[in-house]
Image: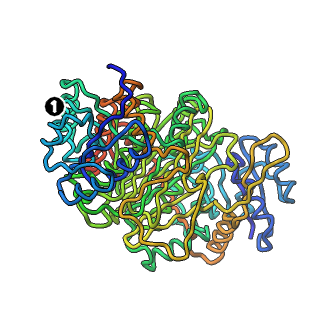
Amino acid sequence: MARDDRPVRLAILGAGHIGARHAACAAQIAEAEIVAVWSRTPASAAALAAQVGARACATLQEVAEAPDIDATIVCTPSALHAEAAIALARAGKHVICEKPLARTVAQAEAIIQAAERADVQLLVAHVVRFFPAFRRLYDLIQGGAIGTPAVIRMSRETAGAPTGWRADLAMSGGALLEMGIHDFDWLLWACGPAERVTCRAISRGGQSAPDYALTTLRLAGGAIAHVESSMVATAGFRTHGEIAGDAGLLAYDSDGDTALRVQLREPGPAPAVQLPTTYTMDSPYVAQLRHFCRVIQGLEAPLITPAEALAALRVGLAALASAETGRTVSL
Amino acid sequence: MRIGVWSLAHMHAMSYLACLAARADVAWVGVLDEDQPERARPAAQEHGLHWVQRADELLAQVDAVIITSANADHARMALQAAEAGVHALVEKPLATARADALAMIEAFASRGLILGTAFPCPFSPAFCTLQEQVAAGALGEILALRTTNRGSMPGGFFIELERSGGGAVMDHSVHVADLLRRLTGSDPLRVHAEIGHGLYHQEWDDSGLLTIDMASGAIATLDTSWSRPKSYPTWGDVTIHAIGARGNAHADLFGQHVALYPGEPTPPRWVSWGSNLDELMVADFLAAVGQGRPPRSTGRDGLIALEVALAAYASTRTGQPVEIASL
């Protein structure tokens, strides 16, 4: 691909909380420029567009046909990623897509095929790879710090049961595809492919999508792993876990290793969707967007391949299937 | 009361000896180790107790024994104790085979003798408080339990399969299996396990992740791995993260400690200040014998916990969850 260091002109598709987050990140880096916003809800598109100094588009087709758009960030509900991603890829736009890549394997494969045929980049926002702690863990493992991983435990807990489309199993997949997908991706990236999955899940809030899940995996190399995906915590956002290898143990806990705690006497209402904060110079979201733009500019090789995003999705879907049937699911 | 400690194969024996030596209501304590008889002499001397060299000699002199042999020897020794009319507190797991556990329960029950399983965790003040709060409905219905009983690889008979009956899963699934029953007020229905050998690369399992469906409807997972390396600041843990309909709770039964950073280039250590659960368990067993009432953990409690471990191993043969009832 030709190298081109002009800013990547982006359209944000979906004006919810993560769309707004990407827009805020784009404002911080020279590599990105938000030129358009589209949403299923025109008022949301107009509001976010006004906020970031971009124009609101009325239809996906308008985005697809706009000559001043290089790439899109797909931030629609998971089950609707395919519709937007395929349309934009076919129009020759690079696709940055929120995780999970799609709600089903068929949708994901269709997106991947459309991007390949159009020869555009397909970059899936598995942002955990850009979190410094998780990157450090990955690097330590690759460097042999604990030998070969044997038992991995990962927990991701947030307050705020899923609402809106996230509460809808068919649209989102709940705790497993919203939260678990992050850890599944990191696990496969750092420790290798999964062989089989056993999962139990509940919906404490009564919505169709699970809000708490316990997943056990066997990896192809013989390691075993446990992933807790919780949207039923009572406060905040916490990731914690450990990787036990045959020559040592790595442990992490966002509660213990934060550089800043602020406690207000009168805290305001908690946000509907909580995002973790790292107190590092680049937020992981900024680092991710810069990387994606530089991939599109031809300056960097992608850190995340579409096949990897599909593999993480397969694990998440296997977990959902196991939770549904009580059986262990082979991949 | 006159008590025997039978075998020093299990490291918990030393703790029980200390507990017994400190009790005013225990008039005489005999220590016997059939594997290495000489090993029992210094252990007895250290606590001012009596060194015994033969099982029949021990059983003839005591009201009760604490059996701390290798797992596979529990049944033979317990049956011998019952035969001699002696009550027994048996180290966990109660036995290594279901038929053995059933025979033990029958042997003691038919003679009106007390059989206890050595589960100290139900005496943890934190666990007792959690159990009370759950029973009072403070958390609402218990829906999910994420638990761990991680430890260090213990060596000794624990890694001789014919004496231990299994590795990490046999060693560490029974404690929490028992706690799950107490918290949910129900028995385990089915068990799935991923069992690993990746920490030590031996024929014995060094790690396990169990998925347990409780009859109450609660879902649970349990990490039984020997995943604490030599440099870890403590031996391991027992933790319970409970998700209830009305709230969550996190119990770390051995979490009470101060951190010690030695002046030497050796790893930091966590020095416990929690209650001595072995002491509470031994006191309960002696009171049960004295009062002729069941101890907090009976032979049946030991059996059901053992069934969870056996089902975990059985599930690896099919790769699917195993019904406890099918054992």
What residue do we see at 68% from left, 50% from top?
B234
Q: Residue furthest bottom?
A: B136
Q: Is residue A119 above or below residue A123?
A: above
Note whether residue A52 is visible.
yes
Q: What's the amino acid at mark 1? A: Arg
Q: Secondary structure at mark 1?
A: helix
**Could you tell me which quadrant the N terminus of chain B lies in?**
bottom right
In the image, residue A84 sits, relative to residue A260, either above or below, namely above
> Percent position (x, y) of residue A105?
21, 37
Q: Position of residue A181 (x, y in %)?
A: 35, 44
Residue receiving disc 1: A90
**Residue at the far top in the pictured view:** A2
When asked about the image quadrant of residue B286, the answer is: bottom right
- Residue B300 visible in the current orientation: no
Residue at image point 78% right, 48% down: B53
Q: Nearer the viewer, residue A103 or A196?
A: A103
Nearest the viewer among A79 and B145 is A79
* Residue under the image location 84 percent in, 48 percent down: B41
Look at the picture and state if B182 lies above or below A42. below
* Left or right: B42, with A229 as reference point: right
Question: Which chain does tag 1 point to?
Answer: A
Residue at the image position 61 percent from the left and 41 percent from the top:
B158
Determine which quarter of the picture holds residue A317.
top left
